[in-house]
Amino acid sequence: MTERLYYNDSYVKEFDATVVSCDRVGEPGGERWRVVLDRTAFYPTSGGQPHDLGTLGGAAVVEVADSEAPDGVEPHVVHYTSAELLAGPVRGRVDWARRFDHMQQHTAQHLLSAAFIELFKLQTVSFHLGEEICTIDLKAGSLTQQQVDEAERRTNAIIFEDRVVEIRFGTAEELAAEGVRKQVEREGVLRAIRVEGFDFQPCGGTHLARTGQAGLVLIRGMERRRDAMRLEFVAGGRALAVARRDFGRLTEAATILTCGLPEVPAVVAKLAEERRERQSALKKMEDRLADFEAAKLLSGPPSPGGEMAGAGGARIVTSSVDDGSASYLALLASKTVARGSTISPVIVVLTGAVGHVTLAQTKGGPHHMAVALRKVLEMYPGKGGGAKDFAQATLTNVAPAADFLTGFLAEATRAIVDSH
């Protein structure tokens, strides 16, 4: 059993210990060493909180975990290091910046969870402390922005009051008698964290000594996760970094938009509306252009191969559309084949910008566009697919030369005829 120094004092940054064992694990070139100490201040990954980093002697500590142990037996703390350690005394140093950040986030989570219980009777069912963002999942079918704002205000009020955060030990019965918020079905002595006059719950993680050290809590997002609501938040140094980053981005946006910071939302909203109007106008223009080009394609001379008997009497139209996007080719193809009929069906083969290709036929035609496309892609590599009356792909290694387009259109035509 490893003596866990952080259980009694989360502020231990350096400590002396004895190396009990050191074994190499992993393959050569990617190996590391599994180190067990008689005592440690390094926190292992547990309860949603990541492990500490730091050094043991001259070796970097790259991971810390609990060893596997049977029920009722306290596991060892296992340190994975970058180099071998000899048995005997060693000096350990915890990466304090990382540790303190984790303490800020974890204590803030306790406060935030307690605020949701106090205000709305909503329990936290899970917690995750990520590298940039922390999350809690609340047992709730829905959550309003007003509730989120109220819980955030209450949490920060407790932080600003700089209340004492203390570590408590006792059996499950003893902690329950003191008013612990969550019951634990474990025997022996348990550890709990009490926030003066506000929260008291079992926890084995590292925490601040006073709420004021959490600085500030910012809730950054909310989303539904099955039968829970997930909230993203940051606290302490992370909250300061996020606020600085957001302010910098807002300032940059105001500079680009040539307006003051308060006017940014209104200016962006106006630009977004103008963009929607332009897109609507462009869509109408593309629609009219496609009508015009479809009529032009059908009024022009027959494509090479013309009206082929092998095509079931259908008229085959091929064309290379300069700068044609995949969406425009689809629109043009649909308008062209729509002008056909069961008596005079139309088949179109179109190529456009950066290798976009479209094959289509009048609805109910005798050929199979997806089958034809697959055959063409055997000669002209690309990715795509479709159905019987319509198929699209994007070719790779497209050459701009005219003979390339001529060859592709000819192969596509032959493939369509063969798909009959």
Image: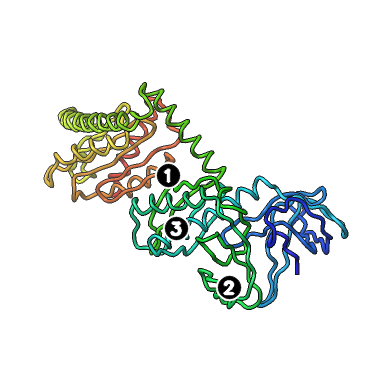
First in sequence: mark 1 or mark 2? 2
Q: Position of residue 300 (x, y in %)?
A: 18, 27
Q: Position of residue 111 (x, y in %)?
A: 50, 56
Q: Is residue 102 left or right of residue 182?
A: right
User: To which residue does mark 3 refer?
Assistant: 115
Mark 1 in CB contact with mark 3 (< 8 angstroms): no
Above or below for 279 versus 34: above
User: To which residue does mark 2 refer?
Assistant: 175
- Could you give the CA–CA distance between mark 1 and mark 3, rounded to whole angstroms? 63 Å
Q: Is residue 282 at all visible to an observer of this figure?
A: yes
Residue at 56% x, 48% y: name it: 212
Residue at 53% x, 47% y: name it: 235
Q: Position of residue 44 (x, y in %)?
A: 67, 59
Q: Is residue 84 left or right of residue 320?
A: right
> Residue 378 — which label?
1
Please tell me how crowded label 3 is: few (under 14), some (14-19), or many (20+) other residues with Cα within 10 Å: many
Type of amino acid at the residue the image marks with label 2: Leu
Type of amino acid at the residue the image marks with label 1: Glu
- Could you give the CA–CA distance between mark 2 and mark 3, rounded to whole angstroms? 21 Å
Q: Is residue 297 at all visible to an observer of this figure?
A: no
- Could you give the CA–CA distance between mark 1 and mark 2, rounded to whole angstroms? 72 Å
Type of amino acid at the residue the image marks with label 3: Ala
First in sequence: mark 2 or mark 3? 3
The image quadrant that residue 260 belongs to is: top left
Mark 2 in CB contact with mark 3 (< 8 angstroms): no
Q: Quick one: SS at disc 1?
A: loop
